Amino acid sequence: MGLAAYLRELSKKPDISEVGLYTPYARHLVEDVLGYPSDGYHIVKSPERTKPDLRLFDEDGAEWVVGEIKLNDDQIRITKRRRSLWARQIKKKRYIRPETVYVILGAKHTIYVCDVQGKILAGAHFDGDHVYDVVARARRPLTDRSLRLALHLVTRNESMSRSRFERFRLGHLRSGYIPLDDASLPAFEETFQYATELLLGYARRAWERLKLESAEFRKELADLEQLIED
């Protein structure tokens, strides 16, 4: 059980540092609870000034979730401190990229899932004898299933779902963006190149599929013409 193992490890390390928190966070919560394989995410080994602490990848390798992990739960739970963290870390350091769909704000016993403007969409507290779903305002048993349910938006299964693209097309889901200025131009160029490569890859696969289908069709047509002649 990921959550139980995580809480057990923390109880043995009351003086754990923020950097020391990263490994149990990744192993027990990201892998065991959210379901990501080891190559489906990246968590820093030590604080990096320009990169988020946590990045979750979808099946195409896109960095669809970025995260900031702190030691103190109050930094996430108290609105004023959370907004300050968002301004200092997420916004100022430009963690949000065009492919970003959600932002995780985490601490020892807290995980919030926000949209790219900082609105809380899902979240949980798990420092008592239960998991508290902050959006549903419901107390649930202290289990992996309860935590996974509260954080359903950022699970591995959700990362493989195409439903979020439909929600985005309908305007129900905000995603990342690039404010155009001198500082962001390299990111825009990188994103344009990334989008072009994805589109070309899709076009090549579609073309190969059509060629195969065309060859099969021509064979079937030749067989039919042969039957007619006979």
Image (spheres, grey):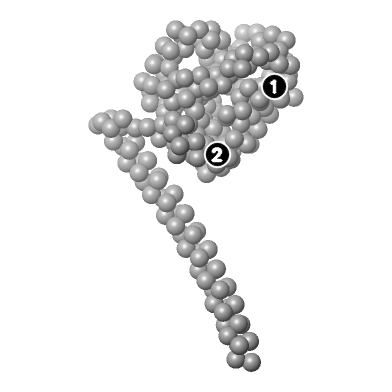
Q: For label 1, count other residues whose C-alpha is less than 10 Å away and answer few (under 14), some (14-19) or many (20+).
A: many
Residue 152: quadrant of the picture: top right
Asked whether 75 or 146 is in front, the reply is 146
Residue annotated with mark 1? 146
How many marks do you count on the picture? 2
- What number is the disc on residue 163? 2
Asked whether 53 or 118 is in front, the reply is 118
Give the quarter of the figure containing the N terminus.
top right
Residue at image position (41%, 11%) is 84
The percent position of residue 9, horizontal first and vertical second, equals 70, 16
Residue at image position (39%, 16%) is 87
Specify the farthest residue to the bottom: 230
Q: Are marks 2 and 1 in contact (CB under 8 Å)?
A: no
The percent position of residue 134, horizontal first and vertical second, equals 59, 15
Q: Is residue 97 visible?
A: no
- What number is the disc on residue 23? none
Specify the farthest residue to the front: 228
Locate residue 21 relative to residue 168 in the image: left or right: right
* Mark before the other along the chain sequence, 2 or 1: 1
Q: Is residue 229 visible?
A: yes
Q: Amino acid at mark 2?
A: Ser
Secondary structure found at label 2: helix
Q: Amino acid at mark 1?
A: Ser
Residue 194: quadrant of the picture: top left
- Residue 66 vertical position relative to residue 126 in the rendered view, above or below: below
- Residue 150 vertical position relative to residue 63 in the rendered view, above or below: above
Between the C-alphas of marks 2 and 1, the distance is: 22 Å
Q: Nearer the viewer, mark 2 or mark 1?
A: 2
